Image (cartoon, grey):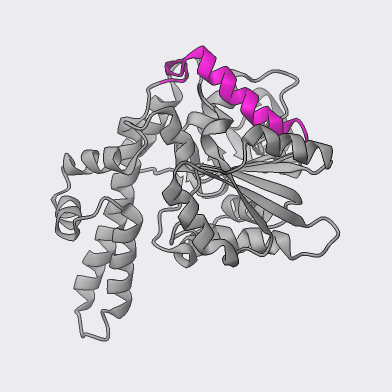
Amino acid sequence: MGSKNFSDIKDYLYKQKRTAHLLLGNGFSIAYNDKIFSYNALSQVIEDSENDLVKQLFSRTNTKNFELLMRLLEDFSNLSDIFGIEPETNIKIMKAHDDIQKALIDAVTKLHPDYVFDIPEAESKRCFSFLTQFLDYGGHVFSTNYDLLLYWVLMRNLTQKTNAIDGFGRNWQISHDTKHAIPGIHTELCWGKYKSTQNIHYLHGALPLFRTRAEIIKEEYDMTSYILEKIKARIEKNQYPIFVTAGDGSDKLRQIVQNRYLSFCYERLSTIEGSLITYGFGFGEYDEHIIEAINKAATKGKEGQLWSIYIGVFSEGDIRHIESIKEKFKCKVHIFDAKTANIWR
């Protein structure tokens, strides 16, 4: 493809003493297993769904794109009053929107590998080695993926030397009577305790993240059940993970700013310094909010700004697309062959 090589980019940034950050998109998961994490795989689960309305919507619009269909419903709802559509019909439209969001979460959950050791040891270690090239040198990792792959790789290879912090931690449970910590009793894994040193950021949420009335919590593996089993149990009780599944970038950003964890992660992306490397992120028509965050980082002043972005591509079509949108970025844009990163194998 005539584009740069990943190792050459890393060597160059290291010599320049420039911090490198990583942005992961769905291509990260597809590179692991394209039979599980592609739109086609998700749409097949939808076709087998028990929700007739959702099936009809995908069939009638002839699309496998969740974002596009949700955007159409949002637009239809926003225009409904102009055409005199009854409020009851508008309620049905937005219910269909919510049903699609739930169908997406259900599909991701059903397709997902059952537990962490489904990932072969060699692939887990190779992926972890790739991630540490950023984390061990002051870089941050950002992901827009909903699945557990990144979480599993980090947890499986976790050691005392691992510099991977997602901001979640435990607090002692406090007695209402004595106002003191109850020995041996901890709260759930809550976000915020370690946010000052956080370097792992799920920009659009993820399967293990849930919002309670007071906290953002992370579901976890324990000795009684696998994490995916615990996530499924929550979903069966109509407790759904934090997922940003809105239509276009503006809609996604509205969802993000309404959640303090997501808004923190987005703000962190907006303030990174050095260079950003992307893998499996296509910068499609619904990703304008991500470009906006990158541009904020690139224009915050010469003291500590984002200087450049290296976008991983897989095909000539990817190159043409990135070339067509280069002018949207306010920092230097480079293209590299994503396959040279060899993340999984």
Q: Is residue 178 visible?
A: no
| Depicted 128 relative to depicted 143: above or below | above
Q: Nearer the viewer, residue 199 or 302?
A: 302
Horizontally, is 253 left or right of 78 in the view?
right
Q: Is residue 90 visible?
A: yes
Residue at 78% across / 34% down in the picture?
A: 137
Q: How many marks?
A: 0
Residue at 61% across / 54% down in the picture?
A: 266
Residue at 63% across / 35% down in the picture?
A: 6
Taking the view exactly as shown, the residue that stands out farthest to the front is 2
| Depicted 89 relative to depicted 11: above or below | below
Would residue 127 be counted in the magenta stretch?
Answer: yes
> Where in the figure is residue 275, as x and y percent of width and height?
72, 48
Would residue 295 be counted in the magenta stretch?
Answer: no
> Where in the figure is residue 136, as x and y percent of width and height?
75, 30
| Depicted 253 relative to depicted 272: above or below | below
Q: Bounds of the magenta span? A: 115-138
> Where in the figure is residue 117, as x and y percent of width and height?
46, 15
Q: Nearer the viewer, residue 264 or 44?
A: 44
Horizontally, is 130 left or right of 205 in the view?
right
Horizontally, is 50 left or right of 73 in the view?
left
Q: Main secondary structure of the magenta part?
A: helix
Residue at 52% across / 25% down in the picture?
A: 152
Corner quadrant of residue 259:
bottom right
